[in-house]
Image: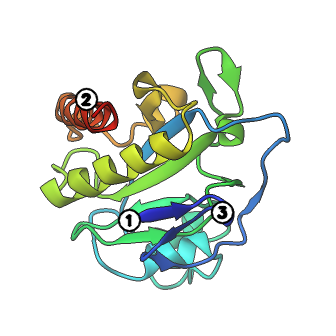
Amino acid sequence: MKLNKATGLLESVRYVPSPNCDARPLAESISLIVVHGISLPPGEYGGPWIDDLFVNRLDANAHPYFSEIAELRVSSHFLIRRDGEITQYVPVNMRAWHAGESCFNGRSACNDFSVGIELEGEDTVPYELVQYERLLELIELLMQAYPTIAADCIVGHADIAPGRKADPGPAFDWSYLRKKLATRLASSRDVDNT
């Protein structure tokens, strides 16, 4: 996996362009990664519905739940499916509309300075090991491309919108992610120092 910083696109992943994005504020640098959880309809995996939501073509009549969300204009930079497939919707150098009303370390409007990564899943169902592996690869790649992202600036949607959002939920293993990320980053530094 390789990120083209000029285009903001990951090479070798499926790209489904979302219109739900705009330019980041000029003075903003990417310094936050927000992990989300999503399944459409809730509890179902693998269908076309997440793509449809993020490109504004979700059929409100296809499922009762969709009538509540079909008019939303939302997106994320990436989705990691249950099988590990990565889809990109918004170039990293653009602002995706994933965080909504949000605040991190006293800074509001987290969309301005963050990258949103959706994991296909539910708050109370364990995520797949391959999803963690792809997430770790993606985080490491983003941290290399944007040194302004610190390891403690990888949070869940619930952390930046408490009371409003709960994802990725209690089923997401933050300690596993942080331990594996620390190991990967240490290994990376060792290689850089040789």
- Looking at the image, which residue is at 34% across and 36% down? 192
Instruction: Determine the image quadrant of residue 105.
Output: top right
- Looking at the image, which residue is at 25% across and 67% down? 84
Q: Secondary structure at mark 3?
A: loop
Q: Secondary structure at mark 2?
A: helix
Q: Is residue 173 left or right of residue 61?
A: left
Where in the figure is residue 79, as x and y percent of width and height? 42, 63
Amino acid at the residue labelled 2? Ala
**Figure quadrant of the C terminus:** top left
Where in the figure is residue 125, as x and y percent of width and height? 18, 50
Real-space Cα distance between discs 2 and 1? 20 Å
Where in the figure is residue 135, as x and y percent of width and height? 32, 51
Residue 1 bears which disc, if any? 1
Amino acid at the residue labelled 3? Leu
Q: Which residue is label 3 attached to? A: 72
Above or below residue 87? Residue 134 is above
Q: Which residue is label 2 attached to? A: 186
Instruction: Determine the image quadrant of residue 68.
Output: bottom right
Real-space Cα distance between discs 3 and 1? 31 Å
The residue mark sitting in front, 3 or 2, is: 2
Instruction: Determine the image quadrant of residue 17.
Output: bottom right
Crowd band around label 2 with a 10 angstrom C-alpha radius: few (<14), some (14–19), many (20+): few
How many discs appear?
3
Real-space Cα distance between discs 3 and 2? 41 Å
The answer to whether any part of residue 86 appears in the image is yes
